[in-house]
Image: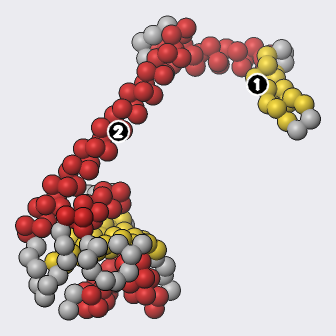
Amino acid sequence: LLIRGTEKVSRGLRISYVAGLRAVRAARLDASILHQAAAQLTVGAGDLPEAIRRLQADAKSSARENQKLREEVAHYHAARLIVEVPYQNGIRWVDRSFDDRDPGYLRQLASSLISIAPHTVAFFSCPEGDSARVTFARSGDLDFHCGHALRDALAPHNLRAGGSPDMAQTLIPANLLDNLRTTLTTQYHQ
């Protein structure tokens, strides 16, 4: 008899087990998995829990460092965009498409850009096959609601978007990207 686990239920305890030859096969499989995991981490089976805790701690530390570096890269990228894109009609309209960036980076880049550059609007897109991710943001000194602007521009196509006054995001069919760009540029840049 091999007990596989226990679980509290409303009026007692649920016990999962296997018996007979199934118990032998399950125990052998467990031992094999334990041996393989220990070999992969180059530790003994008894040291496996500590090795896993160490890996988890390293992963958390790496994730924090990665996030910090992404923020720094986004800040420098935003500074470069400010230099590259001049004001026109009192607004810096930064329109960029990125093939190699994830939505989190676009959000971070837009946030950095609008926080350091007054009178600035960011329209960032990232094609993803037949779809495109769009991030639309504005600096705090401009007077329109990005979420409402994006929602209103997509309403004729029966699409939805959401966001705050400063930033909004959506996923749209790629064939509507130019239409959305034109609609927002016409409404908020000229």
Q: Are marks 2 and 1 in contact (CB under 8 Å)?
A: no
Upstream in sequence: badge 2 or badge 1: 1
- Residue 100 position, x and y percent, is 26, 57
Q: Quadrant of residue 154?
A: bottom left
Q: Tell me: residue 87, above or below residue 110.
A: below
Are there few (<14), some (14-19), or many (20+) residues within 10 Å of tag 1?
A: few
User: In this rendering, would 131 be left or right of 184?
Assistant: right
Q: Is residue 40 visible?
A: no
Q: Report the residue at 46% width, 17% height from top.
A: 51
Q: Is residue 27 visible?
A: yes
Most distant residue in the right direction: 11
- The residue to which callout 2 is attached is 64
Q: Report the residue at 11% width, 61% height from top.
A: 80
**Colour scheme in use:** secondary structure
Between 68 and 45, the one lying in front of the other is 68
Are there few (<14), some (14-19), or many (20+) residues within 10 Å of tag 2?
A: few
The nearer-to-camera label among 2 and 1 is: 2
Which image quadrant: the N terminus?
Answer: top right
Q: Tell me: residue 189, above or below residue 77.
A: below
C-alpha distance separating marks 2 and 1: 35 Å
Between 83 and 156, the one lying in front of the other is 83
Q: Report the residue at 43% width, 82% height from top.
A: 148
Which image quadrant: the C terminus?
Answer: bottom left
Between 174 and 90, the one lying in front of the other is 90
- Residue 92 position, x and y percent, is 16, 77
> Which amino acid, by three-letter code, is at mark 1?
Gly
- Residue 11 position, x and y percent, is 92, 35
User: In this rendering, would 140 be left or right of 76?
Assistant: right
Between 89 and 69, the one lying in front of the other is 89
- Residue 181 position, x and y percent, is 28, 83
- The residue to which callout 1 is attached is 5
